[in-house]
Amino acid sequence: MLHKLLLLGAVLLAPVLPAAAQTSAAPDPSRITLVIHGGAGTITRQNMTPEKEKAYTEALNQALQTGYAVLKRGGTSLDAVEATVRFMEDSPLFNAGKGAVFTHDGRNELDAAIMDGQTLKAGAVAGITVVRNPITAARTVMEKSEHVMLMGPGAEQFAREKGLDLVDPSYFRTEARYQQLQKALAAEKGAVPDQLNTPTQKPAAPAPAKSKVKLKAGKPGSYAEPPIFTEGRKYGTVGAVALDQYGNLAAATSTGGMTNKRYGRVGDAPIIGAGTYADNQTCAVSCTGWGEYFIRSTVARDIAARMEYGHAPLAAAAQATLDKVAKLGGDGGLIGLDRQGNFTMPFNSEGMYRGYIKADGQTQVLIYK
Ligand code: ASP
C-alpha cells in the first residue's frame, strides 16, 4: 500500500520536478564506476624514476580503492568523489592539499569544487590557505550555505564556523614543490613576463639581451610561453568523477593551482563549467591543465553542451573540446563519465596520472601516453 502511494506521488510530482531531479534510477550496483586523475603535464618515462612511478601508482590505486569502498557499500557518487579527492589532498604527491604548489610569494593557495549531477547543486572555494581538505570546504559551501563559491578569508571564516579541520599554512609545504617555485623564479628573472598570447596576437617581445631564458617564438597558431608558468609544467591537480548505484553522477576537483601564480590568481578547478561540472543528463567532468585556457574554453560545460544539444557521445565531445583548448595554445587533460558508465580520459600533454575502477573491481592506473 505504502509502495503504491509512493508510486502515485512520484507520478504526480514528476511533471513539476526539474529535469535533472527526475533522473535517479532504481539501485543497480553493477553500474558503479569511479574515474580519477592526479594531474597532467610534462610527465614522461625519461623524467620518472622507478621509485616515483611506484609511489604514484600506489597512491592512485589507493585513491581508487577509497572511492570504490564508498560506492560498493551503497554510498553516493558525491560521497565517493569527496572521499577520493580527500585522500589525494592528504597525499604529498599531488598538487592539492598537502603538496600543493607555491605562489610567487611562497604561499599555498588552494582551490576546489564539487558538483552533484542529480540536483545541479555545486560548491567551490578559491584561494584558501588553512583548510586541510578544500574539497570538503567546497562540499560544505554547497550543502550548508546559499552560495556556490566562497573565496579567501571569507571562505576560511565559513570553514571555521562550520567546524572544518583547520591547519597551519605550513602543513601544505613540501620541499619538492618549494624547489619548483625556486626554479620558476629563476626562469622568470630577466625574461619578459608576457601573458598568454593568443594565436591572433604577435609573439611576445624578445627577452632582454642578458636573459638566458628564451621565450618560445610564437609559431603561427601557437603562442609564446610565459616562463612564470612553464618551468616544470606538471600540473598535478586531482579530480574524481563517479557514478553510483542510483544512477547519479558527481564531479570533484582540487588544486594548488600553478607554480608561481600571483595576484590572487584562480584557475579553472573551482570554476563550475570550466574545470568541474556534473549533470545526470550528460556527464561528470574534472579537468587538469593550464587553467587559463580551460576557463576560456569553458571545458567541462562545453563537453556537456555538446552532449546535450548536439547529442555527441562523451568521448567525441571531450576530444572536440580538448582540441579547442589545444588550438588556443593550452594543454592538459580531463576525465569524463556518463550515466551509462562510459568514460574517457583524454589529454594533450605528455602524460596524465589517471585511473578507473568498475563495479567488478576491475582497475587500471595509467601515467604516460
Ligand atoms: N588546472 C589547474 C590550474 O590551472 C592546474 C592543474 O591542473 O594542475 O589551476
Image (tube, rainbow, N blue to C red):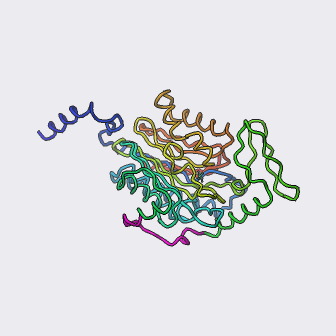
- Vertical side of 68 occupied by 10: above or below: above
Task: Report x, y in % for residue 41.
Answer: 65, 51
Quadrant for residue 232, please give it.
Answer: bottom right
Q: Which residues are magenta?
A: 159-173
Quadrant where the image shows the N terminus: top left
Left or right of 68? Residue 350 is: right
Task: Report x, y in % for residue 258.
Answer: 62, 56
Residue located 46% across and 31% down the image: 308
- Vertical side of 214 occupied by 174: above or below: below
Quadrant for residue 141, please give it.
Answer: bottom left
Within the magenta stretch, is there residue 162?
yes
Q: Is residue 362 visible?
A: no
Quadrant for residue 218, please give it.
Answer: top right
Left or right of 99? Residue 260 is: right
- Vertical side of 63 occupied by 121: above or below: above
Foreground residue, 358 or 347? 347
